[in-house]
Amino acid sequence: FSSTLRSHVATAVHAFIKAICLGTKHWSASVQQDLLNFLSCLFRYGESKEVASVINAEIGSVALEAWLGVLPQLLARIQINSPIVRSILHPLLTRLGKKHPQALMYPLSVLVKSPVK
């Protein structure tokens, strides 16, 4: 990716995280849309060290409860090939599991029983 694109994506990621944090209701449509856009940036451009550093620096500011609405999308990428993206995704899922284990039980059981592709 070009340096201009990486810079724009890093700025967009920062803006999405800020918007998610400022959202008044974690289940609102706008917060969920911002989370999905953030995840698109993570999964598409997360290999970039510039983008990954912004994500790592700011992901902790997002309330854990906000991630519950996009849990299926997070779990769908649990075995992503990128080590950089995995190093962001797995700690997030670990934190979610510690605080909300009940939210992970059914989706993980479905994931374990589904055939690997």
Image (tube, helix red, strand yellow):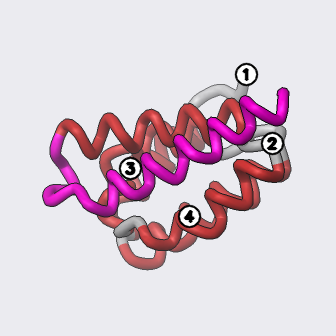
**Residue at the location (82% across, 35% down)?**
3
Q: Amino acid at mark 2?
A: Glu
**Residue ID for mark 2:** 47
Which quadrant, please, contains the C terminus? top right
Q: Is residue 100 above or below residue 39?
A: below
Residue 52 in picture, x, y percent from top left: 72, 54
Q: Give the alpha-carbon distance from disc 4 to disc 2, as whole Å.
A: 17 Å
**Start and end of the magenta stretch?**
1-28
Secondary structure mostly seen in the magenta stretch: helix
Q: Which residue is mark 1?
A: 117
The residue singled out by tag 3 in the image is 106
Q: Is residue 14 magenta?
A: yes
Side of 38 where 82 appears, left or right: right
Q: Earlier in the sequence, mark 3 or mark 4?
A: 4
Residue 96, quarter of picture: bottom left
- Please indicate whether residue 100 sits to the left or right of residue 48 in the image: left
Residue holding disc 4: 92
Give how far apart the Cα atoms at labels 3 and 4 are: 18 Å
Residue 116 part of the magenta-drawn span: no
